[in-house]
Image: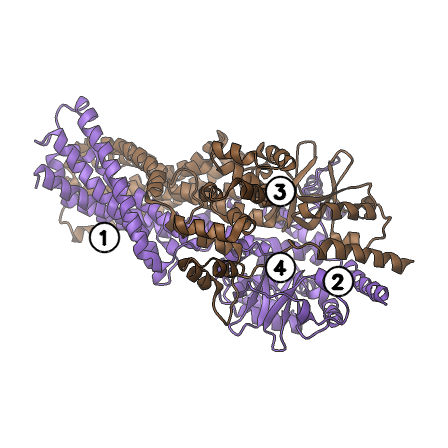
Chain colours: A purple, B brown
Amino acid sequence: MESTRRGGQAAWWRFVFLAQPAAGGHPPGVAEETDKDPKDELLRALEAADASGFLAAAEEVHYADLAAIYEDLDDEQRDFMLKTIGPELATDVIAELPDTLIEEALNHFKPAQLRVLLGNLSDDDRVDVFQVVSKEAQVRFFSLLGPRDKELTKNLLKYDEETAGGRMTTQIGRITADMTVKQAITVLRRDREDTETLARIFVVDAEGRLVGKIRLRDLAFSTWDTPVRDIMEEADEFVLATADQEEAARMLSKYDLIVLPVVDEFHHLLGVLTYDDALEIVQEESTEDIEKLAAIGGDQSEVSYLNTTVTMHYRRRVTWLVGLAFVSIASGYVMFRFSEVLQQAFVLSLFLPMVVAAGGNSGGQAATMVIRAMALGEISTGNALRIAWKEARTGLFLGLSMGIAIAGFITLVLPSMQSTTGGGFDFPHLALAVAVAITVQVLSATVMGALLPICARAIKLDPAVVSAPSLASTVDVSGMLIYFTVAAAILGLR
Amino acid sequence: MESTRRGGQAAWWRFVFLAQPAAGGHPPGVAEETDKDPKDELLRALEAADASGFLAAAEEVHYADLAAIYEDLDDEQRDFMLKTIGPELATDVIAELPDTLIEEALNHFKPAQLRVLLGNLSDDDRVDVFQVVSKEAQVRFFSLLGPRDKELTKNLLKYDEETAGGRMTTQIGRITADMTVKQAITVLRRDREDTETLARIFVVDAEGRLVGKIRLRDLAFSTWDTPVRDIMEEADEFVLATADQEEAARMLSKYDLIVLPVVDEFHHLLGVLTYDDALEIVQEESTEDIEKLAAIGGDQSEVSYLNTTVTMHYRRRVTWLVGLAFVSIASGYVMFRFSEVLQQAFVLSLFLPMVVAAGGNSGGQAATMVIRAMALGEISTGNALRIAWKEARTGLFLGLSMGIAIAGFITLVLPSMQSTTGGGFDFPHLALAVAVAITVQVLSATVMGALLPICARAIKLDPAVVSAPSLASTVDVSGMLIYFTVAAAILGLR
């Protein structure tokens, strides 16, 4: 009896898994072949417009590599590639393409082929497509979906692109707690084609609320009539659909999860995020932060650097550059107003760029530290006072160190290069003036650099809008003011 | 017969997996408990020095959270925590701690406890420990290892910390191609306590060279006497042990792998990297790049921002700041040399900060784009010419746009604020001078910003050493030179 039941269970295992062709596909790609490299084959067939050779080679190459190759092709070659591989394989390739190339790629297909292709996409990839194509294409593509996919897509499109809900897949193993193992297995078997990962199966109650999780192997080793409730574990880690995607990625990373369930505010299970989503999110968010910190605007380009057009590079950089240029006029104006002070002692110009730049540099360091710590979830706006206190001390010590170093230079080295200061004051006074100015400038810029991103966050802006260049342009103004005011006071200029 | 055999196989499944207590542990942690939060319980017990209460609460909290809590404690509380939870649970907590806290944490334990703790660590976590503790502690801890762990640790320590070999775990399912399914299962069962993940089992030949991979479910559904060779798949994706950890993370990410095998140059299987390693690597490398770009030096702190001391913050920032300050004297010197030009037309000072800063900003953008593209593997030093050509065009258009904008300001707006230019020339000439200077400055800074990181890479330096501030300090000098030379020529100053 025991053995028969077990035999019966082994049969469903076979049925569920061996019959599942998509559970891997295990495409080659980086194989160290002793014979010819399929990627070279591919390019050769492409040059020769040899469709059957191309198709044969394409089947040997991982679709992620096919997508990378596609990016580097010209229009005609792209058309050849997509038509040759056909809608089935093209589905995998298009899901890997950068956002900006997706609509164009889809337009290579006729409606009948598009219907196949859009139907083949996993639900989260399909939503990605709808999120990035034009309004016109959205309507056209939507009309090609089957009724269930229409419903699913509409539901997923409700969530913002950068939230857990916007990135989740709904194709998951999902059973209810009051099922028996046998019933659970029947459901999983029925749904298996829609199920992206069976690494974790989630258990819901009659209302669809998340109540537990279970592993396939636990189902496999329990008797048919065991209630799922008895063998499931608590699903302790989950994330709200409206939560920022970064928060979800942090949880996957912190708890080393393969799958993280996504729920609504009533704890209904909506879908899951997987470890590969976490990797993508972390890559994207880091790139975004890095670019913002360098005052590069606009949406992050998913197209590789070399495939981004000059026009696109130009567009993402010009706004900030022109804006910051006009901010710099404020620094110029301060300098212009203090022209008489400068004219009385042109030696001051030797240290003007130093004092000014020191603010941008130290402020930029502080801002970067704080922005990164916020991105990693280490600090929040509630820590503003502690952060200000820490940065004030750090900034003071940094400013003093720089002041002492530069005062040493002015009193010990400079006299050997210049016989007089040329302003009616001695080197020690000049040293004092520059040292005091740089200390005040570094201290104030460090605190500002740390607090501005926190203020941005407090008013719901991305902290990384406080880019290093915009911060530098701001503290340049204060640097000019501090330098000339301090120098005039200490050196007795007017 | 068929059914008996299947029954026999089910028995080993039960044996291998149900008997495996560590295969999860499934700690709670983020549970939305209706009753009290275990983290609050934990802190309450800590305050009250209530050991049994603390232990009970600690068992309800994920060890990643315990590690985060540990970081925020003072010395006495840390001692209480470690002693209360004991070496078993402390193993998991210590493996999650930032590098700088590990040695101190281990020193809370007596040798006998340390022996347990070090033995419990997974081999990659153990190597991490040896990589971060002092020489003295290395010797002391090493003497506490069992003979097999000694051997393993010595082998793993050969690889640099930031390579695939330095991060891999060697605790993997590993069978040979000529085994039968029955033999393979026997081996996996014997080794199961040493095996970190069975998500993918790798197949080697008699010499230990990687020849294939297989999933547990494939073993489970084949008959006892099937040779492994017949059911394994090709292991197409792998990475060399000496490869940079970033390359390994990129492969895990690109091919959505859970496990990536690590081999030596003779294709011997050494170990594996897993998806959670990839996440960690990507996080670390991004933080490193972001910090370097802001001229923050030294080793990236794994301690959270608030737990990093002021001294440590100071140390990581001071070197670059002082160094850059002295570089700025070069800009000051150029300004000083051109004092006569400036004195003839002080109105030039209005646009001096603008022209100078425009170089730093546009160069910083270009450098950031290139550095990020290199980090993502999109470009290499071989693309230098294409990159230079792309950036030259982008820089030219950016410079022209800024020049036109500022020329418009000088001819249309400035005359209403200043009655004369005060230098014996008219506003259109001033506009021309500033526009030409800013165009030349932006063009040259953009190309320099793009090429310097590539040069750094070419001489085996990290491209991110070309930080935005160091680039800015460099192009500040050229900016001063360009501005004064162009202005003097166009405006007829000397």
Residue marked by disc 2: A221
- Visible in this render: residue B241? no
- Which chain's residue wears label 3? B
Label number found at residue A106: 4
Q: What residue type is labelled 1?
A: Leu
Between the residue at mark 1 and the residue at mark 2, the CA separation in whole angstroms equals 82 Å
Left/right placement of residue B324 relative to residue B108 reads left
**Label number found at residue B169:** 3
What kind of element bears circle 4?
Answer: helix
Which residue is painted at 51% across and 45% down in the image?
A305
Residue closest to the far top:
A416
The CA distance from mark 1 to mark 4 is 49 Å
**Amino acid type at mark 4:** Leu
Could one spot residue A173 in this view of the protein? yes
Badge 1 is on which residue?
B412
Toward which corner of the image does residue B268 lie, by quadrant? top right
